[in-house]
Image: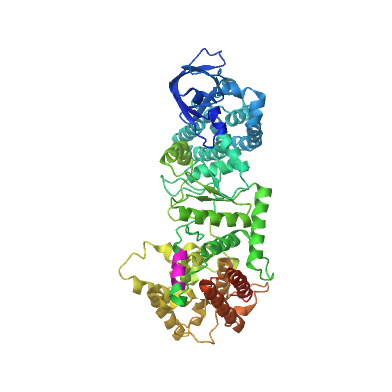
Amino acid sequence: MKWVSECFPDATRYEKQHCTNKFSGKVRSKASNESCFELTVEEAPNDDDDWKGISGMPVFVGRRILGIVQSVPPNFTGGTLHATPTWKLLEDTAFHKVIGHDGQTALAKKIKDKLVKVLRRSPSVVNALIDQEQIDIDNDIKNLKGEQQIERLAEQLLLLKTDTCAVIEALYRAHCSLCEEWDDESSEQSAKAAEILVNAAQFIVPAVYDYGVIQWTRSQQDTSLVPLPVHIKTSAEIIMAGVDGRETRLRHRKSEKDYPEGEFSLPQIPECGIDPGNVVAREAQRDHLDRKFNPIVEVDVSRRLFDDYLEVTYYQPESGAPKRTREERIELTAGALERRRRLKGQTFYMLFYLPQDTGEQYAIRSLVQALKKDYPAIMFLSLDLTSEQEKLDQDLVYPFCCMLPMMGPETPDTAPKLLPSLQEKPSSMSTQRFKIALSFPGEYRDFVKQIATRLADQVGRDQVLYDEYYEAEFARPDLDTYLQRLYHDESELIAVFLCADYERKDWCGLEWRAIRDLIKKRQVSTVMPLRFDNTEIPGLFSTDGYVWIGGRSPQEIADLILQRLQINAGSPPPSSPPSPPKLSVPPPHALETWREKLNQFEDDLAITADSARKFELRKLIEEAKAKIRELGG
């Protein structure tokens, strides 16, 4: 085998430049009872000083450390080196402790009890694992029976010195053997055994994964952005399962080629509005420039959308509780995440492929740093972009992924949860296809998408008219008239998100024509206006009621839409005190005053050159923004 390595020569300790020297050669085996092996040196530096520091150099064969070079005498430039093999190092108690191997043993024992419970459910799984040649199972285990055999097998699986790839392949082949046993008489039993083996694999794989990587990742809990030595998101979930000491929790595969993400992996682009290419930011900036001719714009779209997503998903305010400020909501959401991490051992994390562009990379790092400060329980991880790492990951996890179940074409990861009053109403009572239709401009897609997701969870995805849910159906030449018919004739309730962008967009205009006709025909209960701003919309008057969105979360808006659907269906509104109806009237004059002040402060900041004045203006801008939020803007 060819070996390679690098070392820092002793001479460079006194120099500013720290360069390494490369060595390579061939590995020579020795007798099995020897505590070292020989290395021939075929490539090495010519300068005698550059050989200094070679003692203790790791010997790499491929990506693995085969051993450590033993001490060499001063001025040594010979052609043969002696190295202590890794297995010998691992026999040393002190070395064992330094690399944290004791921790791996403790983790294996913690997982063992859970694995034993899984294996108890199926003797077929136990036999299938014992029969695999890829893993070195002790022969005496085959002679044991019952509980004792299961205990020993679980212990051996978790503490195997076999390569992780070999363990995963053995699990895969055991799974295949169970699946091949299916026939008309035993298909149900074999299918259950195969499912149990998948459950067992989800405990075993993170327990046998590279413990050094898992231990290092665990130690980086407080780091803002942690680089992981993996490329595939499935591998990241395996590492995070090892960090938490749990089984892997993976989403359903969508196809044979899919490498699924973990359930605790927070969505990044585009679901949460994270915007590394600054696409949203640039569009907002252009719009602002068109209106104000102001060359300096502060855009925080991505951050706000991510805050909204976390709040909707992980924090549920009490009914009737006072409305919290944005800072309070962030703090409460962060607390909910921390409790789940501490008490349930569930670390939420977000994965990034950092772009090559330095500016975009800096933008993401800055965003992550701010998020980590507010949400310390979340781990933010960057993945390895190299094709070499991608291939290594695929070789490792592909057999594991092949064992996982696939999601059907229309099967969501979790069953929709209907509100009780909506469950009781048979679908046959309505001849309309959709319970809720959403009409909105593309500028607010990220916000509305979260509302659509919440609505789909409650009434069913096929009951929500949201364009992304019907991509294939909407690929048609007559889409304009087709959409108008769906809004006009096939929707029980239309939630219209009104703003300046809505008024000027062509497609919104087409939908609005169908909605106006419903208003004209006095079918006003089917229309629910919601406003992002005070833009005048043809067909609406100052006396018409609406919901003012302001700083409300997508979840809160979705719940208001569901309440309106209940009222239309003849069900009474919730008995708990609703939110104050401040949103049915235009925002107060004070809000407009503070908005004008904010615009003026921003204009002054753009043109002033005095640093003291800039400092003062920035304070005034923050004060104005706080006032606007306080007034519901």
- Tell me residue 203's x, y (percent): 58, 38
Q: Position of residue 607 (x, y in %)?
A: 51, 73
Q: Nearer the viewer, residue 616 or 12?
A: 12
Up-down: is 4 above or below 623? above
Above or below, comparing residue 3 to residue 410 in the picture: above
- What residue is rendered at 50% in x and 34% in y? 19
Q: Is residue 577 above or below residue 105?
A: below
Left or right of 508? Residue 597 is right
> Where is the C terminus found, in terms of image quarters?
bottom right
Residue 151 % position (x, y): 64, 29
Colour convention: rainbow
Camera-nearest residue between 47 and 581: 47
Q: Position of residue 229 (x, y in %)?
A: 51, 40
Going 59% across and 32% down the picture, which residue do you hit?
158
Tell me which segment is drawn in magenta.
Answer: 280-288
Left or right position of 369 against 257: right
| Residue 283 belongs to magenta span | yes
Q: Nearer the viewer, residue 251 or 240?
A: 240
Residue 433 appearing in the image: no
Which secondary structure is most common in the magenta stretch? helix
Q: Residue at x 57, y 63 (%)?
A: 308
Q: Tally the marks.
A: 0
Residue at horizontal 52%, vertical 35%?
18
Residue 321 drawn in magenta: no
